[in-house]
């Protein structure tokens, strides 16, 4: 008998999770032996992997600061991961306590962990859903409860798109999100790129992630730029993430070693 | 330590501290993710550097300050082995120098301060690691139990769906079969009894046809609800379509199950409002009730189902109780019916012939062909065992066709000096109604060379109800060919004398029951009936054959009445043609 789609997922903690591997790269301890083993294999393949994750996370922080400063008060963070440190709600609620954040992730443990962290925060919530079902995300009652999409909202899809191959039609997914947003809304994207990487590094990294059940799908600068369709990219456009509005000039040297491209776009009025 | 604090902090320390802080910040870069801006980081490190410097010079020397710095670093997420190593290195190499600290025992103090920082840091890092491990494990557990709960719920839902009918939410056939099997497999006592009511709505199709399928579905739901309410304590299941079943466990006897059936009938027979109309639904129920020991689910289901059909055949709107004797009879009949085609193929059928004799001179006029079945298990069967079945199922057409062909074939080969007898063959109603009857007879006669006037077809009155009908026209064409047409069993059916005038009939065969009433010397009603039949037939130019003539006395009476011919034991029993022919020569 085929499992109907309301049947729950298999319980699967024996397999490395990209969310917990990412936590490991960032120096967190929200991970299990399987995750550490996989992350260490990644580090063996690409020694600067932890630095790449840190650079991406720092990009997320700067982008969210930028948006909070621009007056955005609603955030939809898709592929939010394990709340380690520097979570979106922590950043924005520092700037404006009335900011509202909806986290979305497919990883059930990440979601359970987020629920625990957010238990006392009625301005932030988490939904277990897949980026590949934007319609379900958009009509989710929790989202509807916290966000009013008639007001400017920032959608963050940071370090997630490389888990969405072209077969899953990322452009259409983003189009659906775009259609739900009002002018003055924002999109933040970042994702792994193999531009300038050695072929061996690339294939070793792919092998590690193949085992997680979330294989990698690299994109180059022009591919990522295309995904901003409908949004006006703010300066400096799609760049290696350390180059995106760096805090100090020296923090963007050797930016291409970050392996992550990112950018921020806005729907014009 | 009693050494006095002779250390001083020279002016220009501020620029020194800035340099140190910058160095420290650089050293920390990339050790782990730092959730703050460079400015925030420097601010923090600046403060901690001051604390360290203060601690180095403080009097009395207080190690707790070092531990606090270690703890604060970890609290600010500067929390990795690398961050500690680099911190120790930077402090060791740069703090005293950058800040220009001068103290007698500064090296000594620095070593102990760094030990305190390391202790505080490591302890905090360990606590933090343990906390994070605990929280992620808790999340995993929460997720796991949520998933398990969802799995259980979905399994329960799965199970419910697999065991219940989607429309009425009654248990479905699966669950019913499961429960019945359990009831049969594990009786509480050897004497436990079990009952089933099979229930099927009467003419449910008509509700669907007249009011649409939605209305039909509403009727089914309504019926399901009523049964559920009326029969609490018993399993009511929907088997599919408009068929329901009630399982009655541990019954005290047939009466209990009949009571359930009556309750079910009463509940269903209440009028229901459907699509704005008041619809009265009726139902039939087949009941079976017996001891658990020695029965099986299949047997019970079959028995209940078959009883349901009896109730339907009896007009519906009622319950009926299983009758094993009737079931056996029907099964035998069914088996027999099913064996007819193969019997034909294998040549198990054969013909005997019974003489029809002239009453005036005893001459053999003809013979009636009578079919026999030499059944491989049951022995020789007479037509009353199987002709009825063959007529019901339509198998009479091939069987009767075979009889006709075989009789003609046989009769075509007879030759008797002084008059070869004709052969009389029974035609069933269905045969008479076949459009190619005339052509078939013609072909047979041609093939066998039997002259038409030596063939007589016996039909019943009911085959010729309406003179305008196609069958009558067919018979007329056969009569025109020269074939004799006899009405069989005359007097037992409609006996509509008027139509005889218009029909192509040559002979009446008077049913044996009238003949049985003929007794010598005392004229009875039967005799008067036969007498008037004869005179009527003669008036219409028909001959009359009396059937069932058993005694010489009866033959005598019939001759006296003027009857033309007789058939019966008195003239000869049915037997193979060659014996009859042998006697003639
Ligand atoms: C590398 S982490 C990124 C976390 C955070 N956005 C950041 O950049 O710091 C990627 C997260 O995306 C989640 N993810 C992967 N594929 C996803 C999908 N199709 N829909 C939603 N989340 C997904 C993973 O479970 C993981 O938690």
Image (cartoon, rainbow, N blue to C red):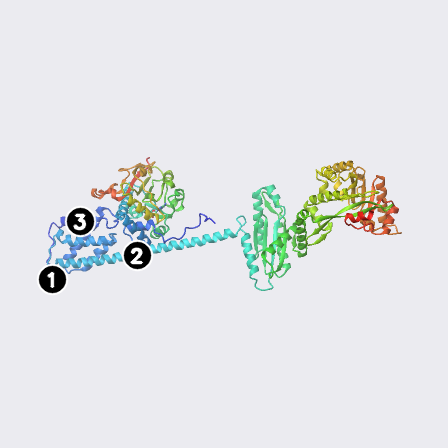
Q: Are marks 1 and 3 on the same chain?
A: yes
What subunit carries mark 1?
B
**Residue B437, position as x, y percentages in the image:** 72, 39
Q: Which one is closest to the eye, mark 1 or mark 3? A: 3
Which residue: 25% across, 57% down? B124
Give the side of residue B393 with respect to residue A2, left or right. right
Secondary element at tag 1: loop
Element under disc 2:
helix
Image coordinates for residue B158, horizontal then vertical, percent: 48, 52
Q: Where does residue B228 sit, x and y in percent of width and height?
A: 57, 53
Residue corresponding to mark 3: B23
Q: Chain of mark 2?
A: B
Q: Is residue A40 left or right of residue B345?
A: left
User: Residue B353 at x, y = what percent?
Assistant: 77, 47
The residue to which callout 2 is attached is B131
Q: Residue at horizontal 30%, vertical 55%?
A: B132
Front-most of residues B25 and A152: B25
Output the chain of dot 3.
B
Q: Quadrant of residue B486?
A: top right
Dot 3: element: helix
What's the distance in space between the residues labelled 3 and 2, CA to CA? 31 Å
């Amino acid at each position: 008998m085929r499992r109907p789609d309301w049947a729950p997922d298999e319980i699967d903690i024996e397999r490395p999770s990209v969310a917990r591997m990412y936590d490991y790269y960032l120096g967190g301890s929200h991970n299990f032996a399987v995750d550490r083993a996989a992350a260490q294999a990644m580090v063996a393949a690409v020694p600067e992997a932890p630095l790449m994750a840190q650079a991406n996370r720092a990009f997320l922080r700067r982008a969210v600061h930028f948006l909070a400063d621009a007056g955005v008060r609603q955030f939809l963070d898709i592929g939010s991961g394990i709340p380690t440190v520097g979570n979106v709600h922590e950043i924005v609620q520092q700037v404006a306590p009335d900011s509202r954040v909806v986290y979305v992730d497919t990883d059930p443990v990440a979601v359970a962990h987020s629920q625990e962290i957010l238990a006392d925060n009625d301005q932030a919530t988490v939904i277990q859903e897949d980026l590949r079902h934007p319609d379900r995300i958009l009509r989710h009652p929790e989202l509807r409860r916290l966000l009013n999409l008639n007001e400017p909202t920032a959608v963050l899809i940071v370090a997630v798109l490389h888990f969405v191959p072209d077969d899953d039609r990322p452009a259409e997914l983003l189009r659906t999100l775009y259609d739900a947003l009002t002018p003055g809304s924002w999109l933040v994207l970042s994702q792994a790129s193999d531009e300038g990487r050695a072929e061996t590094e690339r294939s070793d990294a792919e092998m590690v992630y193949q085992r997680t059940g979330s294989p990698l799908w690299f994109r180059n600068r022009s591919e990522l730029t295309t995904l901003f369709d409908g949004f006006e990219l703010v300066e400096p456009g799609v760049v290696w993430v350390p180059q995106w509005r760096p805090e100090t000039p020296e923090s963007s040297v050797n930016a291409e070693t970050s392996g992550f491209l990112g950018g921020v776009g806005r729907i014009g009025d | 330590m009693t050494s006095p604090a002779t250390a001083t902090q020279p002016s220009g320390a501020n620029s020194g501290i800035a340099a140190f802080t910058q160095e420290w910040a650089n050293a920390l870069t990339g050790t782990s993710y730092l959730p703050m801006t460079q400015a925030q980081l420097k601010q923090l490190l600046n403060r901690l550097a001051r604390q360290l410097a203060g601690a180095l010079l403080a009097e009395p020397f207080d190690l707790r300050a070092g531990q606090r710095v270690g703890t604060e670093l970890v609290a600010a997420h500067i929390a990795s082995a690398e961050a500690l190593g680099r911190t120790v290195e930077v402090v060791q190499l740069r703090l005293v120098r950058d800040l220009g600290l001068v103290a007698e025992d500064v090296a000594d103090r620095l070593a102990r301060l760094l030990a305190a920082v390391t202790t505080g840091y490591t302890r905090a890092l360990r606590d933090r690691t343990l906390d994070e491990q605990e929280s992620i494990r808790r999340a995993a557990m929460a997720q796991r139990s949520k998933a398990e709960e969802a799995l259980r719920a979905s399994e329960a839902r799965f199970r419910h769906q697999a065991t219940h009918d989607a429309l009425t939410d009654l248990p479905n056939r699966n669950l019913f079969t499961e429960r019945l099997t359990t009831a049969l497999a594990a009786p509480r006592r050897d004497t436990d009894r079990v009952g089933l009511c099979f229930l099927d709505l009467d003419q449910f199709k008509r509700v669907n046809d007249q009011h649409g399928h939605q209305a039909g579905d509403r009727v089914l739901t309504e019926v399901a609800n009523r049964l559920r309410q009326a029969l609490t304590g018993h399993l009511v299941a929907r088997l599919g379509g408009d068929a329901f079943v009630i399982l009655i466990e541990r019954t005290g006897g047939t009466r209990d199950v009949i009571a359930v059936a009556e309750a079910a009938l009463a509940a269903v027979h209440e009028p229901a409002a459907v699509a704005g109309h008041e619809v009265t639904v009726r139902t039939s129920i087949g009941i079976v009730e017996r001891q658990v020991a020695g029965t099986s689910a299949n047997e019970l289901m079959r028995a209940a189902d078959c009883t349901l059909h009896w109730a339907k055949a009896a007009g519906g709107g009622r319950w009926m109780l299983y009758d094993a004797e009737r079931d056996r009879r029907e099964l035998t009949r069914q088996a027999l019916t099913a064996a007819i085609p193969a019997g034909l193929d294998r040549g198990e059928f054969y013909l005997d012939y019974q003489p029809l004799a002239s009453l005036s001179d005893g001459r053999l006029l003809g013979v009636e062909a009578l079919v026999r079945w030499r059944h491989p298990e049951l022995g020789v069967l007479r037509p009353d065992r199987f002709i009825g079945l063959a007529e019901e199922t339509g198998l009479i057409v091939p069987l009767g066709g075979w009889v006709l062909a075989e009789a003609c074939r046989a009769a075509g080969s007879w030759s008797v000096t002084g008059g070869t007898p004709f052969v009389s063959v029974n035609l069933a109603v269905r045969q008479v109604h076949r459009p190619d009857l005339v052509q078939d007879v013609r072909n047979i006669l041609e093939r066998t060379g039997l002259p038409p006037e030596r063939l007589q077809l016996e039909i019943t009155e009911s085959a010729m109800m309406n003179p305008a009908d196609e069958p009558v026209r067919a018979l007329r064409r056969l009569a025109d060919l020269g074939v004799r047409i006899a009405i069989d069993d005359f007097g037992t059916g409609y006996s509509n004398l008027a139509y005889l005038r218009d029909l192509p009939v040559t002979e009446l065969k008077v049913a044996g029951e009238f003949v049985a009433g003929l007794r010598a010397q005392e004229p009875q009603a039967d005799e008067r009936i036969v007498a008037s039949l004869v005179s009527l037939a003669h008036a219409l130019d028909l001959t009359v054959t009396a059937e069932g003539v058993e005694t010489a006395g009866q033959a005598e009476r019939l001759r006296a009445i003027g009857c033309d011919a007789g058939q019966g034991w008195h003239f000869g029993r049915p037997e193979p043609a060659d014996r009859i022919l042998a006697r003639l020569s």
